[in-house]
Image (cartoon, rainbow, N blue to C red):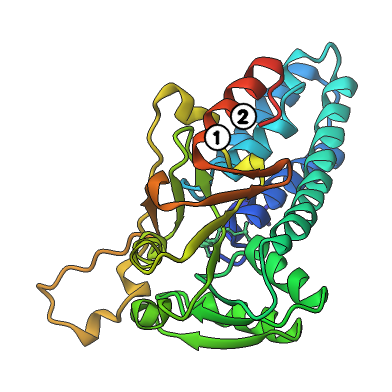
Amino acid sequence: MKGIIETTADDIREMKVRGAGRIARAGADALVKYAEEYRGNDLNNFLKDISAAESTILGSRPTAVSLWNGVRITLRDVRSASSFEAARESVIRNGKEFSESSFRAVDEIARMGAKRICDGDVLLTHCNSSTAVGVIAEAVRQGKDVKVYATESRPWRQGLLTVRDLSEAGVDVTLIIDSAVRSVMKKVDRVFVGADTVTSSGDLINKVGTSQVALCAHEARTEFNVCAETYKFSPRTLAGETVAIEERDPGEVVSPSDIPSDVKVFNPVFDVTPARYIDNIITEIGIMSPGSVYGVLSSRMGASTDI
Ligand code: RUB
């Protein structure tokens, strides 16, 4: 039987758990459970085992830095611990703290983001971001009358989750296919999307198609907002590292039997929206321009490793 680490990595890889915030919490929670149930009391063995667990979790999906940050925050004190018990306790404490602060960040973003929404607004969202959905649901909870277009988001159709979430929150929501974005954009006042990673130059990596949504918004002079907890900011990009864009199985797009055998299928999962198409990044520490991400990352990296 697989243990908690392998099961969690499989669930993330197979998208049973998906969305950048959820996978980050799943990674942290798995490490907590692993530490809680660890049999043994030797520090060196524990460090070796927890490093293997870290690699397994991080190997599940490559693009969302939230997972990397969640794991890193969970394990930040483990390698300097002076005893097995201190090491184990640090994983449990830091992992739990990370998950709790992640939920708090999503709530804070909902509160702040909702302020940007005006009564009567028409909104658009892409894919399924729990953070972006939280913002829209909070605005509606406050009594604002809004209409939302939600994209289907091929091939996984996460848009169906979004319309269900929004409908349950009492939102007037219309599902559109991804290629209908430009057709509706002139009617849209504001776009809200989530983030898998935000680079130090303020570029956004999110569900494939986000950059097309941003271009359409730019053309129509529609406000483009990114809802991103700061653990989606990538310290690794400060050092110039580029973000790996996950490619998934062609069978997710089309059944091989439906196309000639010489046809290739390209299935990238995320894309890059350049900072110049982004008006606001709504985080738990405030609403900022993409140009401010560098400062947040570099000051936090100097003072602590909390991002
Ligand atoms: C989901 C996606 C979401 C972000 C943010 O992609 O791109 O917009 O992950 O989500 P996938 P959240 O379905 O491939 O994981 O705001 O919930 O963290």
Residue type, numbered disc 1: Val
What residue is shown with label 1? 293
Choose between 210 and 62: the one closer to the eye: 210
Furthest residue toward left: 262
The answer as to whether callout 1 falls within 8 Å of ligand 1 is no
Label 2 Cα crowd, 10 Å radius (few <14 / some 14-19 / many 20+): some
Q: Is residue 147 left or right of residue 177?
A: right
Residue at position x 64%, y 21% in the image:
299
Assess whether mark 2 and mark 1 are in contact (beta carbons under 8 angstroms): yes
- The picture places residue 110, in percent across and down from the top left corner, at 74, 60
- The picture places residue 140, in percent across and down from the top left corner, at 76, 77
Q: Is residue 115 above or below residue 299?
A: below
What residue is shown with label 2? 296
Residue at position x 54%, y 88% in the image:
174
In space, the residues marked 1 and 2 are separated at their CA atoms by 5 Å
- The picture places residue 143, in percent across and down from the top left corner, at 81, 79
The quadrant of the image that shows the N terminus is: bottom right
Q: Is residue 4 above or below residue 43?
A: below
The answer as to whether callout 2 falls within 8 Å of ligand 1 is no
Residue type, numbered disc 2: Val
Residue at position x 81%, y 15% in the image:
81
- The picture places residue 151, in percent across and down from the top left corner, at 47, 78
Q: Is residue 91 left or right of residue 17?
A: right
Mark seen at residue 134? none
In this rendering, does residue 39 appear at all? no
The quadrant of the image that shows the C terminus is: top right
Label 1 Cα crowd, 10 Å radius (few <14 / some 14-19 / many 20+): many
Q: Secondary structure at mark 2?
A: helix
Q: Is residue 157 left or right of residue 173?
A: left
What is the quadrant of residue 141 in the picture? bottom right
Choose between 154 and 45: the one closer to the eye: 154
